[in-house]
C-alpha cells in the first residue's frame, strides 16, 4: 500500500459553547517536519497531538492547525467577590486616610488581577478530549486522501513497469543479433583486408576477436538484475506499509543497470530502447518523490 506525502484533512465539532476546528496539510519532505499552530485551549496538548501526528505520518512537511473558540466565553467568566471586596476596602482606607470622598468605579476594579476569573486551559477535561477526537478525525481524513492518491500512483507505477519490461524484452531479443552482426561485419572486413594483401584468414585470431567483443558487449547480467529489480519494485508496491525510500533506491539501481547496458551494447536499436527506459525511469523518479 502506497501513501502520498501530499494531502489535506479537516474536522470540526461543537461542544457546548466551544467550537473545535482542526486542519492538517502535508507536502513532500525527505524527513518528518512538523509545524503546529494551536489556540490557547489546545496548547497544553501540544506534545500529545504531535505524538498523534507521528503515529499517522512517517515523512513529509506537516502543518497542524487547531482552533478552539468559545461563543459564550465572556458569560462563562465570573467575579471573585472576596478579591473584589478586598480591593474596595483597601481603596476606601486609602481615601479615608487622605480625607477624600470614596466613590469607587466598579468597572475599573474589574480589570485588577484576580477579580475576573475566566476559563483557563486545562480546566476542561471534556474539551481536551474533544480536541483529541477532532484531531484524530482530521488525521483519518488526511490518511484517506493520501491512500487514494497512493493507489493512483501504484497503478501508474505498474503501467511504467510494463513499459520497462517490454523494452527489456526487446533488448533480450536484440542482444544475440548484435553479436551475429558484429561477427559478420568483422569477418567481411578482415577477409577483404586479407584478400587485398594475398593473406589467408586465421580463424583462431578471428574467433578470439569475436570472443573479446562478446565478453565486452554481454549484457545478460544486467538484464537479469533488471528483472530482479522489477520483481522487488512490485513487491514493495504490495507491501502493507508505504516504503518510498526503498522505491527510490530501486529506481537508482534500475538506472544504473540501464546505463551499463547502453554503454556495453554498442548497438543503435538497443540504444533507442535504453533512451526510452531512461525517460520512463525519470518519470518514475519524479513520482516516487511523493511517496511516503
Image (cartoon, rainbow, N blue to C red):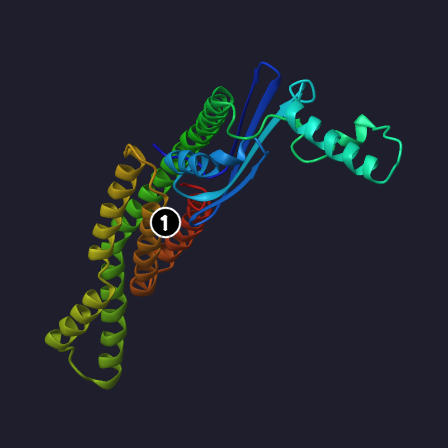
Quarter of the picture holding the C terminus? top left
Q: Nearer the viewer, residue 255 or 30?
A: 30
Quarter of the picture holding the N terminus? top left
| SS type, badge 1 | helix
Residue 96 higher or lower than 177, as above or below: above
Q: Nearer the viewer, residue 247 or 189?
A: 247
Please say whether residue 80 is visible from this viewpoint. no
Q: Nearer the viewer, residue 51 or 242?
A: 51
Residue picked out by circle 1? 248
* Residue occupying the far top of the picture: 16
- Taking the spot 45% from the left edge, 34% from the top edge, the residue there is 49
Q: How many numbered discs, if any?
A: 1
Among the 4 quarters of the image, the one containing residue 161: top left
- Tell me where residue 286 appears, x and y as whole percent: 46, 47
- Tell me where residue 132 appears, x and y as whole percent: 46, 26
* Residue occupying the far left of the picture: 204
In the visual, does 271 lie left or right of 93?
left
Please say whether residue 191 is visible from this viewpoint. yes
In the visual, does 153 lie left or right of 176?
right
Among the 4 quarters of the image, the one containing residue 15: top right
- Tell me where residue 131 appears, x and y as whole percent: 50, 25
Q: Nearer the viewer, residue 11 or 77?
A: 77
Residue 205 higher or lower than 243, as above or below: below
- Taking the spot 82% from the left edge, 35% from the top edge, the residue there is 96
Amino acid at each position: 500500500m502506497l501513501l502520498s506525502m501530499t494531502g489535506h484533512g479537516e474536522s470540526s465539532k461543537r461542544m457546548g459553547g466551544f467550537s473545535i476546528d482542526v486542519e492538517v496539510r502535508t507536502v513532500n519532505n525527505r524527513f518528518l517536519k512538523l509545524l503546529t499552530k494551536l489556540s490557547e485551549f489546545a496548547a497544553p496538548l501540544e506534545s500529545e497531538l504531535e505524538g498523534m501526528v507521528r503515529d499517522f505520518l512517517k515523512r513529509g512537511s506537516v502543518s497542524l492547525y487547531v482552533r478552539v473558540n468559545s461563543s459564550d466565553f465572556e458569560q462563562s467568566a465570573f467575579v471573585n467577590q472576596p478579591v473584589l471586596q478586598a480591593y474596595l476596602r483597601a481603596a476606601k482606607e486609602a481615601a479615608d486616610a487622605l480625607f477624600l470622598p470614596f466613590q469607587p468605579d466598579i468597572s475599573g476594579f474589574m480589570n485588577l488581577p484576580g477579580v475576573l476569573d475566566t476559563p483557563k486551559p486545562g480546566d476542561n477535561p471534556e474539551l481536551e478530549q474533544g480536541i483529541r477526537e477532532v484531531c484524530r478525525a482530521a488525521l483519518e481524513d488526511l490518511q484517506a486522501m493520501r491512500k487514494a492518491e497512493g493507489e493512483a500512483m501504484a497503478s501508474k507505477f505498474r503501467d511504467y513497469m510494463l513499459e520497462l519490461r517490454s523494452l527489456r524484452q526487446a533488448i533480450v531479443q536484440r542482444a544475440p543479433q548484435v553479436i551475429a552482426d558484429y561477427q559478420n561485419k568483422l569477418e567481411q572486413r578482415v577477409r577483404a583486408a586479407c584478400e587485398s594483401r594475398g593473406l589467408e584468414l586465421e580463424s583462431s585470431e578471428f574467433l578470439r576477436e569475436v570472443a573479446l567483443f562478446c565478453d565486452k558487449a554481454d549484457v545478460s547480467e544486467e538484464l537479469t538484475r533488471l528483472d530482479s529489480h522489477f520483481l522487488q519494485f512490485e513487491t514493495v508496491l504490495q507491501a502493507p506499509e508505504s516504503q518510498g525510500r526503498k522505491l527510490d533506491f530501486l529506481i537508482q539501481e534500475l538506472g544504473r543497470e540501464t546505463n551499463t547496458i547502453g554503454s556495453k551494447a554498442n548497438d543503435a536499436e538497443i540504444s533507442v530502447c535504453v533512451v526510452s527506459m531512461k525517460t520512463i525511469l525519470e518519470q518514475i523518479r519524479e513520482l516516487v518523490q511523493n511517496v511516503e
